[in-house]
Image: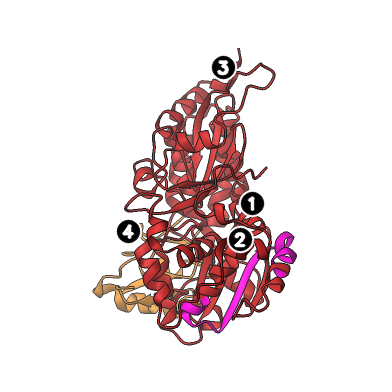
Amino acid sequence: MKLRVDWTVCDGRGTCVELLPEVLDQDPWGYPMPKDGSRAPEVPPEAEPYARRAVAYCPRLALRLVPSGR
Amino acid sequence: MTATMMHPGPLLSLAAAGLSEHVRRTGQLPWQGPGGRLIGLLERAGLTGRGGAGFPTWRKLAAVAVGERPVVIGNGAEGEPASAKDRTLLTRAPHLVLDGLQLAAEAVGADDCYLYVPARIADRARQALADRAGRDRFAVTVVEAPDTFVAGEESAVIARIAGRRALPTDKVDLVVRSGLRGRPTLVQNVETLAHLAVIAHRGPAAFRRSGTEAEPGSFLATIGGAVATPGVYEAPYGIRLGGLLELAGGPATQPGRDGGKQPLSAVLVGGYHGAWLPIADAVSAPMSRAGLAPFGATPGAGVVHALPASYCGLVETARITGYLAEQSARQCGPCRNGLPMMATTLHRLAAGERDSRLPDQLARLAALVVNRGACHHPDGTVRLVRSALRVFAAEIDLHLAGRCSTVEGRR
């Protein structure tokens, strides 16, 4: 699965960065920054439960998991 | 900017402002019937989008045609300040665009049809539509685009037509599948629609007589900056940038001297989201995706802007980046924060602040904002800034040493 950020909604609370340190860094302004530099980073299978939690706990509901093909 | 349109090609040679002259030149509307015959013609012609992205037009039409109750939108917003070709086309050849809109609507089986244009030409567009009563099968609603840079971005176009502000939105699905109110939507640049109409009128073989095998056809170029006769010109893809500059009369003459041509230092290709090429490379570089790829550039929407050697490339890039930062929709954090910081850093460098960390700071900021936004505004701005770091590298060294080539050139 890939993690998509709706940048128009995200305001950099940082919850996702805490839950998914293997996928996301935090930029100097607090916004999530995919470590692989991609638009929608791949989530390794072992991190998927944390990714789902990040999606559910995002206070702005800015995240979603989408199939890797898209 | 004056729109001179010298040397008309296959598109502009058919241009007529009024309907009767248009009909005299092109004949009746060449309806293609249901079943997507036009889509096959477009595939054979190899027409690609002229709004900047260069996507194959037939693919977009084919994707929209399979959906329920499709929407077709002719996009003439042209938010790019260095571009004048869409409004020139809508003024000089509105019926080519409107023919294209009708034929695209027929090909996809459209339910609704819109023309999205700046307010200052909306009345003219409505008049042209009124004149076409009896020629058209699809009613077209004119929607006014605000004069902002991002207003012509595909999702911003759809937002505006849906009655919201013209701001880009997050794209969960492709607009060809889910666009205006969730319906399959074709957003097509007005120049693309005009080419589409000419292909329906004249056939794909005639279209392929200009351009290259891989990138067929002609395009409208807005040629500006330090050229003798800035304006909109039609040229075939693959023409060398030097040839394009010649279409616009070559370099402008020196102010205050008699007859001498201004030396040029660089050319900005593809507009404010484009890339700089040093003049030595630009002269022989072909205006095509393949020809410009080695320079990190694309033809974009056909903007070519010549920089005179008397004008500092860093100052010009700082000015453009400042404009782009102002034009951020301020929805996405990296763009809202990063673009003003890039502009400020460039301004410091351009103004001669001797801080050797500035170029690295720019490169770091570019890496922070690229790929991180609902639209490509940050990515386009990064393309421009990165090209300036490459092309004006020697100028950056001069500035860091407390000098500037343009000042020294005047001594």
Residue A57 visible within the image? yes
* Chain corresponding to red in the figure: B
Tell me, yes or no, whether the highlighted magenta stretch contains residue B181: no
Disc 1 target residue: B326
Residue B126 percent across, percent down from the top left: 71, 70
Q: Give the class, few, some or many, for how many residues have Cα within 10 Å of label 3's Cα (few <14, many ≥20).
A: few
> Which subunit holds the residue at mark 1?
B
Residue B369 percent across, percent down from the top left: 47, 53
| Residue numbers of the magenta segment | B105-126
Q: Amino acid type of disc 4?
A: Asp
Q: Is residue B407 above or below residue B292?
A: above
How far is disc 4 from disc 3 in space, using C-alphas? 45 Å
Instruction: Mark 3 and mark 2 in contact? Answer it, CB < 8 Å.
Output: no
Of residue B275 and residue B117, the one placed in the foreground of this image is B117
> Which subunit holds the residue at mark 4?
A
How far is disc 4 from disc 1 in space, using C-alphas? 29 Å
Disc 2 target residue: B329
Which numbered circle lies on residue B409? Answer: 3
How far is disc 3 from disc 2 in space, using C-alphas? 39 Å
Which quadrant holds the C terminus of chain B?
top right
Q: Colour of chain A?
A: orange
Q: Give the class, few, some or many, for how many residues have Cα within 10 Å of label 1's Cα (few <14, many ≥20).
A: some
